[in-house]
């Protein structure tokens, strides 16, 4: 079948139909704004569907093959047989390349004359639109940086929580070790005091000439026995206390190290959160600035209303992904 595109307009048609899906939509909306002003949201939805169905290029694509074109038509909820679907596809396919571009579907849907679409006016003040587009692009970069900062903040917060948990457990271990060391020290002192008291008492009786010789001799004998007694219990208490002291000191050092790491991570998390908040504020600022610029462009007259509507719709979509309430914190 012969192409429906007038031969004199083939070159321009190829240029337009080769634009990305969104640009094709804007072309048609610019040229037929009086008819499409209230159709923007529907056209936006169709454009998103085209982009999702384009398995190779996504939003950067410009046309769907026959299989995915059928999928698009099915997504509209129309019940058709395979033959009916193919017939409809052939009706839409204006240049008969067995593919469906966004502009072909819009021509079919709104019954626009093909030459009128190809030659549709695109607005006189393209400089204002291009400037607004550059602001939207800048806002997009700010959004990308914002997302990166938010990810970094989340990672830093998770790290801070992890090290805080480690520090808490280390502090518990250090406390238990200190308590164990205190019990060992108390036991050692108790045994030492008991030993010294027995020695002192026997020494006192042994040297006390006011008591009988039998008692003094008995004290001297018990003193000798005490001095010759196996010191193992006391030695064991000393060894135990030395071990618990080392354990306590090590636990305390580990706890202090963990606490220092937790403090450092907490500071890093707070810095990351501050950076994230600032990035959200900057993204909000740039999106608002771009929208304000588009509002000014509207007032200039002779502008591409389709471009303006589309850019403002993109801004509205981006704002959906701004975290709520985060930028307002100080």
Image: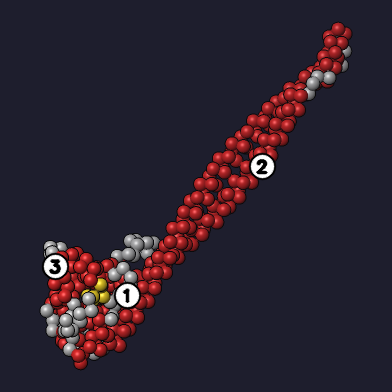
Identify the mark nearer the N-term, 1 or 3: 1
Disc 1 and disc 2: Cα gap in Å?
A: 64 Å
Would you identify the image quadrant in which residue 119 lies? Answer: bottom left
Residue 290 is situated, as x and y percent measured from the top left of the image, at 31, 77
Is label 2 in contact with label 3 (beta carbons under 8 Å)? no
Residue holding disc 2? 249
Q: In which quarter of the image is residue 208?
A: top right
Residue 113 position, x and y percent, is 13, 84
- Label 3's element? helix
* Residue 168 sits above or below residue 219 on the image: below
The image quadrant that residue 125 belongs to is: bottom left
Among the two numbered marks 2 and 3 on one chain, the one whose residue lies closer to the N terminus: 3
Please report the residue visible at 51 percent of the width from the left and 46 percent of the height from the top: 165
Q: Check the image and name the residue furthest to the front.
A: 1
Name the side, left or right, on which 54 lies relative to 216. Answer: left
Question: What secondary structure is found at the residue carrying circle 2?
Answer: helix
Which residue is rendered at x = 77% and y = 19% of the image? 198
Residue matched to label 1: 60
75 or 201, nearer to the observer: 75
Of callouts 1 and 2, which one flags the residue occurring earlier in the amino acid sequence? 1
The numbered disc on residue 83 is 3
**Badge count:** 3
Image position, residue 193 (x, y; %): 74, 25
Residue 294 visible in the displayed image: no
Q: How is the image coloured?
A: secondary structure
Q: How far apart are marks 2 and 3 (CA)?
A: 84 Å
Q: Residue at the location (48% across, 58% down)?
A: 156
**Can you tell which of label 1 and label 2 is closer to the viewer?**
1
Q: Which of 17 and 251 is in front in this view?
A: 17
Image: 77 above or below 248: below
């Amino acid at each position: 079948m012969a192409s429906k595109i007038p031969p004199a307009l083939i070159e321009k048609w190829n240029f337009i139909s080769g634009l990305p899906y969104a640009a094709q939509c804007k072309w048609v909306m610019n040229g037929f704004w009086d008819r499409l002003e209230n159709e923007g949201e529907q056209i936006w939805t169709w454009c998103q569907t085209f982009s999702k169905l384009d398995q190779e290029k996504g939003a950067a694509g410009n046309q769907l093959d026959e299989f995915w074109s059928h999928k698009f038509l099915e997504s509209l909820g129309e019940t058709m047989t395979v033959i009916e679907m193919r017939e409809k596809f052939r009706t839409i396919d204006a240049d008969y390349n067995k593919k469906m571009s966004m502009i072909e579907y819009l021509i079919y849907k709104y019954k626009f004359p093909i030459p009128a679409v190809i030659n549709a006016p695109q607005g006189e003040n393209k400089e204002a639109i291009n400037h607004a587009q550059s602001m939207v692009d800048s806002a997009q970069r700010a959004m990308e940086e914002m997302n990166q900062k938010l990810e970094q903040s989340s990672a830093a917060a998770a790290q801070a929580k992890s090290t805080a948990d480690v520090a808490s457990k280390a502090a518990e271990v250090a406390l238990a070790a200190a308590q164990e060391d205190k019990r060992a020290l108390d036991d050692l002192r108790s045994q030492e005091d008991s030993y010294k008291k027995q020695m002192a008492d026997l020494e006192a009786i042994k040297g006390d000439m006011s008591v009988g010789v039998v008692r003094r001799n008995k004290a001297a004998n018990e003193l000798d026995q005490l001095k010759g007694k196996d010191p193992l219990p006391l030695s064991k208490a000393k060894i135990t206390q030395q071990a618990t002291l080392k354990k306590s000191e090590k636990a305390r050092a580990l706890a202090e190290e963990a606490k220092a790491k937790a403090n450092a991570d907490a500071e890093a998390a707070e810095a990351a959160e501050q950076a994230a908040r600032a990035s959200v504020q900057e993204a909000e600022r740039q999106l608002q600035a771009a929208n304000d610029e588009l509002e000014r462009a509207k007032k200039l007259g002779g502008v591409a209303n389709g471009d303006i509507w589309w850019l403002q719709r993109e801004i509205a979509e981006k704002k959906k992904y701004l975290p709520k309430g985060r930028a307002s914190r100080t």
